[in-house]
Amino acid sequence: MSGMQAMKQTMFDEFEIKGYWWIPGKQEDQVAGILFFTEDKIHLELIGSLSDDFLSMGNEKYEIILGFSDKGEQFTLLNVNVKKSETNAPGFQTQTYSIQSFIVGGYFVNQEEIQFHSMNFQPTYLTEWLGRPVFVDKTTFEKDKSSILGKEVSYNKYDTFNHYVDVLGATIEETYNSKFKADLSEKVLWTNKSVIKIIPNENKDLSWFSSNMYILKDLLNLFIGHATYFESIAFYGEEQKMEHTDKMYRKKYMYFFRQNKSKLKEKFNWSDVIVNFNDIENGLNNILNFWFEKHSALEVVYNLHFDEFYKDMYINTTFLNTVQILEIYHRKMYEGKVYHKKEYRALAKELKEILDEKFPEAFAKIIGNKVDYGNEYSLSMRIEEILNGFNETTRNLLIGTEEDINKFIRQLVETRNYLTHYDSDKKKHILMEPFDKYFAVQRLRAIATLILFKEVGLDETVMIDKICNSKQYSYGLREAKKLLN
């Protein structure tokens, strides 16, 4: 619909904004057009052109385009690409731009100028996951219980969390948006949505806020076990004084970008969650600090693990990616060396001298290159060490006996090598069937999930019970034992 106020929209709405648009520093060259926001794209259609030379246009890019809507709202469009330019009639030109994201509520003439005091963002399922008892329902009956005398719904103010994350230099707190709409003769609509707020020690740029809200969303993904999306994002800037009063407020900006919501669940149930908020509430401060503290070391692990929540991949690709999660995790968090580094350097030097002395140069060079990496753990050694880091009960629940574990490791290594080189010679444990690979992936993802729970300080015994009883992994772990052991 056109004629809407963008500040009142969410990232789940579709809307159109009529306005005038220009390049920073060239406000006198405004061009009329419409900004379209939909689930899969953001584009601007102009009747005219922002380019000085329409006929010579190619693939122009603009860091920023500014706009002013028919509702009086200010827009900053970010990372704009020209997609199409047409001349439909003599002198009548149109131009279409693709836009990565935009800010509503103010003008910013360059990326460096975009600084904020704090941000609020609302991920899907957050309100349900927190499970706050917001509304209290009280019904009054006749003495004989035959009919209802009255019904009351009251708002129950509740305590929210507030934690300081040292490594981030910011406070992360819970807040909420409550809205009340009523036609008292017909209907009442009272809604409450939980929100996460990030307040750094000092103003930060858009990139800082964006990166850290994604890191927080990944933590929510870990607990819920599903893809989550952003319903709304708001930034808060400089303090301003309200008219006719001494009260101060922070200027509000809304932020919009594209999301492919193909994995959005239509209905959210408690049975969909791996770990409830109540399970981790008391340790949340430590969890947040661990999560951000370890992000730099485990960023690739986070990305590989959570990307799988959002993508549909071929089973072979998924299998390779999931094995890689454990391999990279081991490289980052374990020593992973067969010999002490100093000892191996001496051995490697001795080996290369023998190679140079007794073998042809070309052959010696090939083997010498392998010697350089000969001190690295093999994939089987890495997975074995990870699994041995769990207690015996956990290993049994995830895989089975020691014999089952050894067999599973061989299956992973031989299948990974086969999918990489397509050489099946002398390999007896390759998982050829898609179902076998699928349930191997389920087992690997359960292992990765447990690893990440442990990395934020959660108890292994409690978490393995949550994983084994979750909708995400209970069936997959059972079937893996039937098919792979």
Image (cartoon, grey):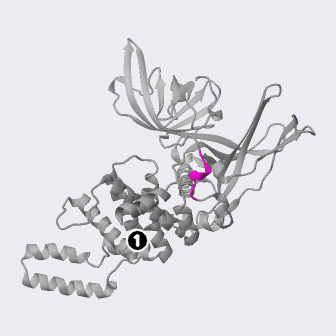
- The magenta stretch is 268-274
Considering the image in quadrants, where does the N terminus appear? Answer: top right
Seen at 65% across and 51% down, the residue is 196
**Above or below, 30 relative to 134:** above
Quick check: 418 left or right of 205?
Answer: left
Task: Return the residue at label 1.
Answer: 330
Task: Locate residue 450, reporting x and y percent.
Answer: 50, 66
- Would you say 236 lies left or right of 317 here? right
Is residue 276 something one can see in this rendering? yes
Residue 393 placement (x, y as % from top left): 50, 74
Q: Which of 66 and 123 lies nearest the eye of the viewer?
A: 123
Q: Look at the image and say whether residue 406 sits in the magenta stretch.
A: no
Circle 1 sits in a helix, a strand or a loop, which is it?
A: helix
Image coordinates of residue 382 in percent, x first then y, are 36, 73
Amino acid on which the number 1 mark rests in the picture: His
**Residue at (71% x, 58% y) in the render:** 161
